[in-house]
Image (cartoon, rainbow, N blue to C red):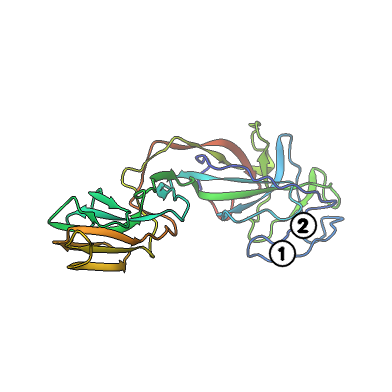
């Protein structure tokens, strides 16, 4: 097991009080017992442990913790920490405008509706097409694909996440001199009693807790995202009806007459178009492509953890 670990995430603040020895509650899928008084270390869920020296707090450790895991009721503080700052990369996102905008017919040069439209027709009047030859058309928002693409960093993570639950220590009833009655650590906690150094302190581990580990509690995130490969599909216009014809009145030789379509249509030889019914935009813009992350990712906020025994599930 590594003794010195890289850096990691932010502290989870949970507050509470417990009159006697701390007891264990449900943690994620573990069904713990109900709260019970702990008048001595003969009580369930309690154990005698060497007293923590100045600068340390008694704690239970949940190694390989999930982000959803929380400390049980009665814990003074929960601290999320870990080993190995993990770059989770970037994701492509779209900023969708409000739905309900007008739709139009976008005409493209060539097949497949690729690139920038050569013409946008929103009028109900028969309009001459500015391009000829092989063309394609799609029904899109009248303002174009007003749906900017952007890249966003995914939150960094730990390679191994550890949750430390700092516990109140009520007294030494039932324990030998130099020991206190501390919370036991049933599964899924690691069975070893542990201490966590208080923030800002850099104490050495006492002899009774000789297994030393250093975990991180935060990230130094200097990453940037390259979103140049990100793209966004426009909102849909399912109700828009259009006509494409060969005559200036849009009455005869029509390859498409008062029809709705949402996919790209390829055509040739048609010279005029009109929008018979302008529908409204619906839904959200959908992202595509892959964003790339660059830059350094490190860890900060190192905390010393001292355990009575070696951790069973070493990070």
Could you say whether the residue bearing mark 2 is in a helix, strand or loop?
Answer: loop
Picture coordinates of residue 149 (x, y %)? Answer: 38, 46
Q: Give the numbered dot on residue 32.
A: 1
Q: Is residue 22 left or right of residue 297?
A: right
In the image, what residue occupies the spot 28% across and 59% down?
Answer: 274
Name of the residue lying farthest toward the front:
249
Picture coordinates of residue 227 (x, y %)? Answer: 35, 43
Observer-nearest residue: 232 or 91? 232
Q: CA distance from mark 1 to mark 2?
A: 9 Å
Looking at the rendered structure, the number of numbered marks drawn on it comes to 2
In the image, what residue occupies the spot 14% across and 54% down?
Answer: 132
Whether residue 296 is situated above or below residue 287 in the rendered picture: above
Could you say whether the residue bearing mark 1 is in a helix, strand or loop?
Answer: loop
Observer-nearest residue: 134 or 102? 102
Residue position for label 2? 23
Picture coordinates of residue 7 (x, y %)? Answer: 52, 39
Query: Residue 245 is drawn in which quadrant?
Result: bottom left
Whether residue 284 is situated above or below residue 302 in the rendered picture: below
Q: Give the numbered dot on residue 207.
A: none
Mark 1 vs mark 2: which is more N-terminal?
Answer: 2
How packed mark 1 is, by other alpha carbons closer than 10 Å (few <14, some 14-19, many 20 or more), is some
Picture coordinates of residue 214 (x, y %)? Answer: 57, 40
Residue 187 visible in the picture: yes
Observer-nearest residue: 189 or 1? 189
Q: Is residue 95 left or right of residue 22?
A: left
Residue 112 visible in the picture: no
Check if mark 1's residue and mark 2's residue have beta carbons within 8 Å: yes
Q: Is residue 55 left or right of residue 19?
A: left
In the image, what residue occupies the spot 59% across and 56% down?
Answer: 68
How packed mark 2 is, by other alpha carbons closer than 10 Å (few <14, some 14-19, many 20 or more), is many
């Amino acid at each position: 097991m590594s003794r010195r670990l890289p850096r990691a995430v932010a502290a989870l603040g949970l507050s509470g009080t417990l009159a006697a020895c701390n007891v264990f509650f449900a943690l994620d899928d573990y069904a713990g017992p109900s709260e019970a008084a702990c008048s001595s270390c003969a009580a369930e869920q309690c154990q005698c442990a060497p007293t923590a020296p100045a600068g340390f707090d008694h704690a239970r450790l949940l190694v390989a913790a999930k982000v959803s895991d929380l400390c049980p009721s009665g814990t003074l503080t929960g601290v999320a920490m870990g080993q190995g700052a993990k770059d989770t990369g970037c994701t492509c996102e779209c900023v969708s405008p409000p739905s309900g905008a007008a739709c139009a017919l976008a005409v493209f040069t060539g097949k497949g509706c690729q690139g920038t439209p050569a013409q946008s027709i929103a009028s109900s009047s028969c309009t001459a097409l500015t391009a000829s030859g092989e063309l394609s058309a799609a029904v899109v928002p009248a303002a174009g694909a007003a749906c900017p693409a952007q890249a966003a960093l995914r939150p960094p993570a730990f390679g191994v996440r550890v949750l430390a639950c700092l516990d109140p220590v009520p007294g030494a009833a039932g324990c030998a001199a130099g020991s206190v009655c501390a919370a036991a650590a049933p599964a899924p906690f690691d069975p070893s009693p542990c201490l966590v150094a208080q923030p800002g302190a850099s104490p050495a581990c006492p002899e009774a807790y000789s297994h030393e580990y250093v975990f991180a509690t935060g990230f130094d995130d200097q990453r940037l995202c390259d979103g140049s490969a990100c793209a966004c599909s426009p909102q849909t216009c399912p109700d828009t009806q259009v006509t494409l014809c060969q005559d200036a009145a849009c009455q005869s030789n029509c390859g498409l007459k008062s029809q709705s379509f949402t996919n790209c249509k390829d055509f040739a030889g048609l010279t005029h178009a009109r929008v018979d019914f302008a529908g409204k935009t619906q839904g959200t813009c959908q992202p595509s492509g892959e964003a790339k992350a660059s830059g350094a990712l490190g860890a900060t906020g190192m905390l010393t953890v001292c355990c009575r025994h070696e951790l069973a599930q070493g990070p």
